[in-house]
Image: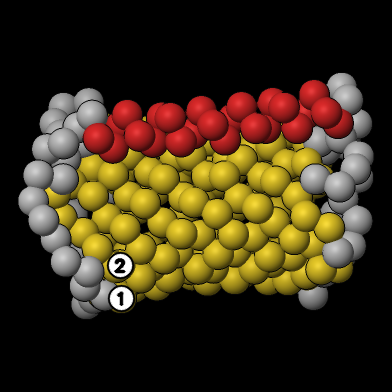
């Protein structure tokens, strides 16, 4: 597949994202929404025998929230802090298995989560596709455990040629479905995340983009979350 064709596919994907965003956000005027910042920093370290560890810190900063049918003022609020420690091992040529532990601090609550995932990466001439299937189990005091099954498709390709080199930009688009089960309740969340990245070096990358999430639309008014995502990746 040529680079021009890949770029056209990506452009159409981004346009589709904004069209989808418009109709879902304004077509469900009774739903709730949140808007804010979602910065994260990721540290990774390669180990022997194809093992790798990753430590991620992410925080949420709410700038505005409410319902579409009411007028809401800007009001900053520190939402929460997330820490995740993952360990992965390469199996086969381009596949990985991983597991880890996640902890969230939200006001006076502590939420813990166990994570298991399997990733399949396919590399083409000018872009890369990654399929990730994961499961997690969330535990919180005085609440029933929540179980989620997730699938994410991620595409990534350079914007300055067929390969990504240092001091070059790239585009990444993530599309994910999260099935959540808690007691007898079921919910589906859909995420769409287009990101513009810049590779400073082999050990340092920065990404900026939009993280849009919609859920609760199966049984009631949809909930929308709009985040400005800032991701920093550091390989040690």
**34 w.r.t. 26: above or below:** below
Query: What residue is drawn where x is 70% and y is 46%?
Result: 171
Whether residue 64 sits left or right of residue 15 in the image: it is left
Residue 176 vertical position relative to residue 53 in the rendered view, above or below: above
**Residue 41, horizontal then vertical, whole percent:** 59, 71
Q: Are marks 2 and 1 in contact (CB under 8 Å)?
A: yes
**CA distance for labels 2 and 1:** 6 Å
Q: Is residue 112 visible?
A: yes
Quadrant for the N terminus, please: top right
Toward which corner of the image does residue 74 lie, by quadrant?
bottom left
Q: Position of residue 77 (x, y in %)?
A: 26, 75
Q: Would you say 45 lies left or right of 71 here?
A: right
The quarter of the picture where residue 168 lies is bottom right
**Mark 1 nearby-residue class (10 Å; few <14, some 14–19, many ≥20):** some
At horizontal 33% and vertical 39% (from top left) the residue drawn is 214
Q: Earlier in the sequence, mark 2 or mark 1?
A: 2
* Residue 90 on image: x %, y %: 80, 46
Residue at position x 41%, y 29% in the image = 20
Please identify the quarter of the rendering in which residue 118 is found. Answer: top right
Q: Is residue 105 left or right of residue 196?
A: left
Q: Position of residue 9 (x, y in %)?
A: 69, 26
Q: Secondary structure at mark 2?
A: strand
Q: Which residue bears the numbered disc 2?
A: 62
Name the residue beneath numbered marker 1.
Answer: 78
């Amino acid at each position: 597949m040529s680079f021009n064709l890949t770029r056209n596919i990506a452009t159409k994907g981004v346009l589709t994202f904004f069209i989808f965003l418009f109709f879902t956000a304004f077509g469900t005027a009774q739903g709730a929404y949140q808007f804010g910042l979602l910065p994260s920093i990721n540290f990774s370290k390669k180990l022997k025998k194809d093992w790798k560890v990753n430590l991620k810190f992410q925080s949420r900063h709410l700038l505005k929230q409410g319902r579409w049918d009411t007028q809401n003022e800007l009001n900053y609020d520190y939402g929460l802090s997330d820490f995740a420690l993952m360990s992965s091992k390469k199996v086969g040529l381009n596949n990985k298995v991983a597991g880890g532990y996640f902890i969230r601090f939200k006001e006076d609550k502590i939420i813990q989560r166990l994570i298991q995932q399997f990733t399949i990466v396919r590399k083409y001439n000018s872009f890369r596709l990654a399929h990730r299937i994961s499961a997690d189990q969330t535990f919180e005091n005085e609440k029933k455990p929540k179980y989620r099954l997730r699938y994410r498709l991620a595409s990534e390709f350079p914007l300055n040629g067929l390969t990504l080199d240092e001091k070059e930009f790239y585009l990444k688009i993530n599309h994910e479905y999260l099935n959540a089960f808690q007691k007898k309740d079921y919910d589906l969340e859909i995420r769409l995340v287009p990101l513009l990245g810049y590779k400073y070096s082999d050990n340092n990358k920065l990404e900026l983009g939009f993280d849009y999430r919609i859920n609760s639309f199966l049984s009631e008014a949809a909930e929308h979350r709009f985040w400005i995502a800032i991701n920093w990746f550091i390989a040690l």
